[in-house]
Image: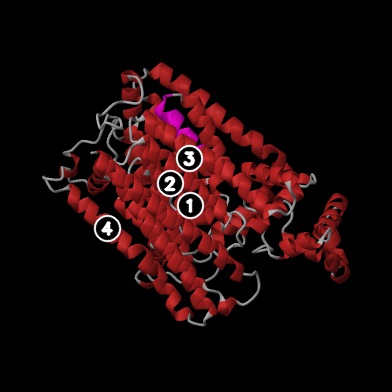
Amino acid sequence: MHKKSFSKRHLLFILGGLSLACYFWMAHLSRQFNWGEGYSDRPILTYLAIYFCLFALYAGGVALVHRGMQTRWTFWAMVAFGLAFRLTLLPAQQIQEDDVYRYLWDGKVFAHGINPFKYAPDEVSEFKQFIVREPDRFELTYDADSILELARLAQLKWANDTSLVFMERINHPGVATIYPPLAQYVFRAVHHLQPDSILAMRLAFLVFDGIAFTFIVLTLSALGRNRNWSLVYFWCPLVIKETFNSTHLDIIGIAFLCASIYFLTQKRFYWAIGFLALSVLGKLYPVILLPLYLKEQARGLNVKSVWQGWVLSLTLFVSLIVTLYLPFLTIGGKTFAGLQRFSTYWQSNDSVFALLVWWFETAVGLEPQGTVGFSYDLPSLAAKITVVIVLLITLAYLLLRKPSGGPDPHATNSPDGLSVALNEVSRQAVAQAPLPAKTDEGAAKPSLPEKELDDATHSLPALRDIFIIMALVFLLSPVQNPWYLCWVLPFLCIFPWRSWILLTGLVGLYYLEFYFDYQDMRQYIPWIPWFEYLPFYLLLGWEFWKTKKPAYN
């Protein structure tokens, strides 16, 4: 046994060392990704080769955990390597992403007492020309206070070379910011720490990443699981690249969602609801999880206690949302203008949604003629309505299903197709959950007192349902940017589906779109999502089929 453990430790060290070398290579390669320069010469294919090497090494690490690697030494070695991976990318140039420039500008605007939702960057850049070209319309558009604010923002733009360059790199400058209040406070804090600093933003994200990881480990311990399963998150190349190189803000909301999940397992529901509200204030779509939290809160309580608990929980949730939004609502509905435009026009890297649009346009015959409602044309509007209906039906089913300590193994015999599908997901989720933690000697031992462990493990069905909804939100979304998948990663530490872990690698193919665009090979771009998602769906289907085999069950 000692020999086996010894070999696993060394194999982990080899995987970590090779991964670290790849991250150094990626950081070095990033110097060739200079904003606005040499698009056709950018080594995107080399970057993808590095990314897929990292994914292969990461998959090897996951396999080690799956085979029982669970000593204290291996946990801290995993943590040390994961931290080293992140530190390696902190000073690197962004590879094909530029959202961080908007974050830095929003923080600067907010830090100077101006509502970041009020003006699009183009308004700041063009307002002086607007005065000259159309003075009458300018006076109708802006009042005296707004003119003073625009003049102040123009001064900030031209304050120094870095400020000027960074503002001119903001993507979609004609759209006001879409990022929720908590994100704005983080951007503001970073500005006070170090203005116009991508490194400062990444360091702030490192703090949130540490919070997320800490609560993942606490949740695994609370469930009596091997805490080395946290490697699924901490070594994931997708999380590391998109957070510490691309510098995407999702880690803010993910951190608070992880905290919320932990407190849910502890039955500390008001803490769970509070952190869920903060997660929503980091990025909006976890709001769909609130009913599942209320269902879990109601489990085992009488009617009077349930209603009292729900009233307090909803009051807490709404109060936090309103309190943080309140300073930005002085401009009324304009606070959500950027979000509305994003929801109407954005579509990127999608799979199921793209097929729905194609079906409504080709098979149903809906004409794509101009903006309709909250979408850019009629087929996409029909697709969005379909997605909402699917999510609501799924959510309703999960809410109405009677709570239990686990899924009914005979539920798949139901003639109801939805019941079949969702109970199959339930069975697979529980089947994929890691086994209880073991001591270094190999004997199973709960990491908590028996009652606490029992209470926590009874929350597994709730965690499973939350995972299902978050997974569906990603799969059905019209915008499936790779970094959106990071929201699913914490759940894979509890339910390590092979198909979802594979998808964290496959979504790296998203960057081929830039390569084909720069090489004038745009005819190949529509095929990219097929290579991203088809292997995932095939493996997912195989996993479902496997659960039906008696030997597997």
- Give how far apart the Cα atoms at labels 3 and 1 are: 11 Å
Residue 306: give x, y in percent of width and height. 42, 21
Tell whether position 265 is magenta. Answer: yes
- Local crowd size for mark 3, using a 10 Å CA cut-off: few (<14), some (14–19), many (≥20): many
Q: Amino acid at mark 4?
A: Leu
Pick the front one: 108 or 203? 203
Vertical position of residue 325 compared to residue 129: above or below: above
Magenta-colored span: 256-267
Q: Amino acid at mark 1?
A: Val
- Give how far apart the Cα atoms at labels 3 and 4 are: 27 Å
**Residue wearing tag 3:** 213
Q: Which callout, 1 or 2, points at the residue further toward the start of the chain?
A: 2
Q: Residue at x 52, y 63 (%)?
A: 26
- Give how far apart the Cα atoms at labels 4 and 1 are: 22 Å
Q: Main secondary structure of the magenta part?
A: helix
The label number, if any, that marks residue 233 in the structure image = 2
